[in-house]
Image (cartoon, rainbow, N blue to C red):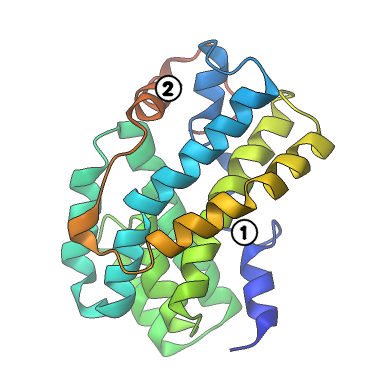
């Protein structure tokens, strides 16, 4: 597996649909919970930790046991009680496997796409299955999940006008050691370790559909 593939999947041009979502930041901002750059950085760190303990366990489990994807996808659906986050996860999961099929056509990915039609198709289990199919190492997949979460929140912050591009890049760099720590702690987690670490963010995101005006889908 070439490093070029890694850079391709983390590039903002890779069409997974994640840029249509703010990961709950837009709702938090409109509710007055995000008022300073420091609050944005704290939100990024909390979101990355949530991804580490609520997504990576399912990514790991499906990557190691792809035959269990149906059961693990059902678990993801039961775990995501927040309707907004649940919907966003299903949209991103389907978009990921569809994109992968078009970029790296193979029978394995075609079969996964067909199977996804009968699943909830949540992002975490489909991330594990899709990136296994293109032979991305599991340790790299875990880091991709964390990076994409941090980048997604910061990109939303820039587009909402909460912080500027330079400030967002400084924050992303500053979060590097924290992401390293999360990657190390979550390397061996599985579905029995699923944890909700950011309940306040979850509650704020659940209010997204009730915002008077909104830029993002979630």
Q: Cα distance, mark 2 to mark 1?
A: 24 Å
Q: Quadrant of the N terminus?
A: bottom right
- Could you tell me which residue is drawn at 36 percent across and 54 percent down? 55
Q: Residues within 10 Å of mark 1 (few under 14, many from 20)?
A: some
Residue 65 placement (x, y as % from top left): 24, 78
In this rendering, position of residue 149 left or right of residue 185: right
Residue 145 x/y as whole percent: 50, 59
Q: Which mark is residue 116?
A: none
x and y percentages locating residue 201 in the rendered image: 41, 28
**Mark linked to residue 15:** 1
Nearest the eye: 170 or 126: 170
Residue at the right extreme, as displayed: 166
- Give percent across and percent down for residue 64: 29, 79
Q: Which residue is rendered at x = 71% and y = 59% of the image? A: 13
Q: Is residue 178 left or right of residue 11?
A: left
Label located before the other in sequence (2 or 1): 1
Taking 82 as reference, is 101 above or below it? below
Q: From this viewpoint, is residue 211 visible?
A: yes
The residue where tag 2 is placed is: 209
Write the residue at 37% across / 65% down.
126
Kind of element beneath mark 1? loop
Neighbor class of circle 2 (other Cα within 10 Å; few <14, some 14-19, many 20+) is some
């Amino acid at each position: 597996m070439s490093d070029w593939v890694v850079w391709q999947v983390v590039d903002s041009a890779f069409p997974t649909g994640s840029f249509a979502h703010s990961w709950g930041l837009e709702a938090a901002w409109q509710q007055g919970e995000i008022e300073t750059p420091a609050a944005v950085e704290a939100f990024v760190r909390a979101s990355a930790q949530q991804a580490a303990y609520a997504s990576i366990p399912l990514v790991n489990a499906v990557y190691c046991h792809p035959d269990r994807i149906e059961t693990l996808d059902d678990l993801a659906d039961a775990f995501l009680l927040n309707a907004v986050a649940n919907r966003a996860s299903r949209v991103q999961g389907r978009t990921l496997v569809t994109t992968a099929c078009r970029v790296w056509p193979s029978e394995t990915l075609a079969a996964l796409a067909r199977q996804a039609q009968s699943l909830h198709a949540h992002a975490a289990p489909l991330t594990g299955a899709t990136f296994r199919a293109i032979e991305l190492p599991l340790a790299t997949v875990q880091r991709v999940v964390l990076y994409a979460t941090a980048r997604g929140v910061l990109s939303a912050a820039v587009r909402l006008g909460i912080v500027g591009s330079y400030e967002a890049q400084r924050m992303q760099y500053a979060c590097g050691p924290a992401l390293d720590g999360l990657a190390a702690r979550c390397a061996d987690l599985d579905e029995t370790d699923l944890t909700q670490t950011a309940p306040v963010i979850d509650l704020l995101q659940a209010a997204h559909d009730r915002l008077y005006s909104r830029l993002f889908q979630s």
